[in-house]
Amino acid sequence: MTTPTRPPARCRTVLLELSRYLEGDLTPARRRAVERHLETCHCCGAMASRLLRTMVACHAEGQRRPPRTVMTRAAQRVTAVIARGPA
């Protein structure tokens, strides 16, 4: 079994901004920086893809925002990823 490692600072910053990025709430310059990171970082790109699929599914159900339980679980997962200590 592998020991989880703490993501680099650059990844932590992007992970904290994913929701704002996907909702279009970042400045154009910051949006471009996040996009560049997502293109080169498999882990962050996968997380963004999963969050986007969740948001699309919730919108398809006629809801403007994902249910609170989904948002809470997503926030907990992002917090857990960020909080992981070094290996």
Image (cartoon, helix red, strand yellow):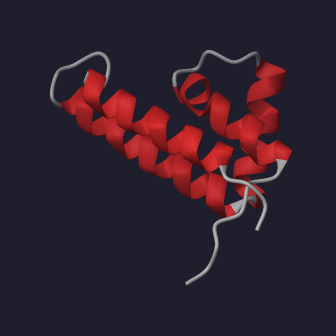
Q: Is residue 66 above or below residue 54?
A: above
Q: Position of residue 47 (x, y in %)?
A: 54, 51
**The furthest residue to the bottom:** 1
Q: Position of residue 46 (x, y in %)?
A: 55, 57
Residue at (82, 36) in percent of width and height:
33
Location of the C terminus (image quadrant): bottom right
Viewer-side residue, 56 vs 44:
44
Q: How many marks?
A: 0
Q: Is residue 65 above or below residue 52?
A: above
Q: Is residue 50 left or right of residue 15?
A: left
Residue at (37, 45) in percent of width and height:
53
Residue at (84, 44) in percent of width and height:
9
Q: Position of residue 25 (x, y in %)?
A: 61, 15
Q: Is residue 75 above or below residue 46?
A: above
Q: Is residue 63 left or right of residue 25?
A: left
Q: Position of residue 81 (x, y in %)?
A: 60, 49
Location of the N terminus (image quadrant): bottom right
Q: Is residue 46 above or below residue 48?
A: below
Viewer-side residue, 75 vs 14:
75
Q: Is residue 54 left or right of residue 27?
A: left
Residue at (37, 29) in percent of width and height:
72
